[in-house]
Image: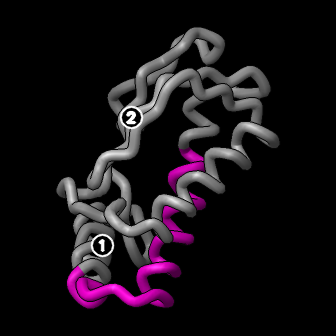
Amino acid sequence: MSEKYKVIDSTVPTFITITVVDWVDLLVRPVYCNIIDDSLNYCIKEKGLSIHAYVYMSSHIHLIATAFNGELQNVIRDFKKFTSKKLIEAIKEYPESRREWLLRKFSYEAQKSGRAKDYKLWQ
């Protein structure tokens, strides 16, 4: 979630958009969507996330979600951190015609932000 938007009550359904940097069309391959699926399922089972509705778009994810075992923004933060690492690993491991461009792009975004270490995938 963006730094300027904060969740006031994690138990109230909240609309969340998680966007790939510069709206890069990353979520176009099943392997990447499977990583998102697995990560959301983990958050549901282990972190108390409840997803009321969701949709994957090519460059972003929309969720309507609540969290009952913690702060929703913390769950989303952890989700973004974990999926960022897993998606970068998948880009490196699986056939990807845009591999070099994607890795360069996410590396550049990390350098530009000054906070991310090697790659910045999510806005």
Measuring from the top left, give residue 21's x and y in whole percent.
Answer: 26, 57
Classify 74 as above or below 114.
Answer: above
Colouring convention used in this rendered image of the protein: one colour
Rendered residue at 55%/24% (across/down)? 65
Pick the residue in front: 111 or 30: 30
Classify 120 as above or below 7.
Answer: below
Measuring from the top left, give residue 59's x and y in whole percent.
Answer: 27, 53
Magenta segment boundaries in residue numbering? 77-101
Q: Which residue is mark 2?
A: 62
Measuring from the top left, give residue 82's x and y in whole percent.
Answer: 59, 60
Distance from label 2 to label 1 (Cα)?
21 Å
Assign a secondary structure to mark 1: helix
Return the mark for residue 58.
none
Q: Quadrant of the N terminus?
A: top left
Earlier along the polypeptide chain: callout 2 or callout 1? 2
Inspect the image, locate mark 2, and give the three-letter code of the amino acid beneath it: His
* Residue 27 inside the magenta-drawn segment: no
Inspect the image, locate mark 1, and give the three-letter code of the amino acid beneath it: Phe
Pick the residue in front: 51 or 113: 51
Circle 1 residues within 10 Å: few <14, some 14–19, many ≥20: many
Callout 2–callout 1 Cβ contact below 8 Å: no
Pick the residue in front: 59 or 104: 59
Rendered residue at 37%/25% (across/down)? 5
Return the mark for residue 106.
1
Q: Image quarter for residue 46? A: top right
Circle 2 residues within 10 Å: few <14, some 14–19, many ≥20: some
Rendered residue at 55%/45% (across/down)? 77
Measuring from the top left, give residue 11's x and y in whole percent.
Answer: 65, 12
Classify 76 as above or below 89.
Answer: above
